[in-house]
Image (cartoon, grey):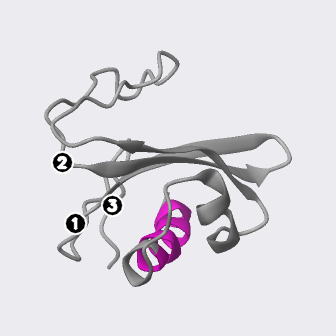
Amino acid sequence: MRSSTAIALPVIAAASAAALECSPAAFAPYLPSNANVVFAYPVAGNSTFNVPVSDIGYPVSPTELNALCALQVNVTSSNSSNYNFGMFLPTEWNKRFLLVTSPPVPPIT
């Protein structure tokens, strides 16, 4: 999943450098040609992000969130495989982020 990090970091940097609108069109230019925005939509403060039913890796909907942009990206990694990753990009960001993968990525040594 190291490639998830490589794709996610430019999106995070773009979101922090500019006040991007929370839409697929706003994030698409920052992704490589093998990646597509599945969804990007604003989540109001003190509300719940409803995890898609198909997301069996994280089946619990987080509640009481700060205002954010919920983003999901699909990456085609070969002719026969692809993967998804999602990010919550807060409206008021402290320049820190947490990346969670499943299974955990071993540390780079």
Between the residue at mark 2 and the residue at mark 3, the CA separation in whole angstroms equals: 30 Å
**Label 1: element kind:** loop
Between the residue at mark 2 and the residue at mark 1, the CA separation in whole angstroms equals: 8 Å
Residue plotted at (69% across, 71% down):
29
Mark earlier in primary sequence (2, 1): 2
- Say which amino acid is labelled 3: Pro
Find residue 33 and report its horizontal and vertical position in percent: 79, 65
Height in image: 40 above or below 8?
above
Mark 2, residue position: 66
Q: Nearer the viewer, mark 2 or mark 3?
A: 2
Mark 3, residue position: 106
CB-based contact (under 8 Å), mark 3 and mark 1: no
Looking at the rendered image, the quarter that the C terminus falls into is bottom left
- Say which amino acid is labelled 1: Glu
Left-right relation of 11 to 49:
right
Q: Which is nearer the eye, 5 or 25?
A: 25
Local packing at callout 3 (Cα closer than 10 Å; few below 14, some 14-19, many 20+) is few
Left-right relation of 84 to 19:
right
- Identify the main secondary structure in magenta: helix
Left-right relation of 108 to 30:
left
Mark earlier in primary sequence (2, 3): 2
Q: Residue furthest right?
A: 79
- Say which amino acid is labelled 2: Asn
Find residue 105 and report its horizontal and vertical position in percent: 36, 57
Height in image: 28 above or below 63?
below
10 in the magenta segment:
yes
Q: Which residue range is magenta in the image?
A: 2-14
Local packing at callout 1 (Cα closer than 10 Å; few below 14, some 14-19, many 20+) is few
Q: Name the disc covering residue 92, or none.
A: 1
CB-based contact (under 8 Å), mark 2 and mark 1: yes
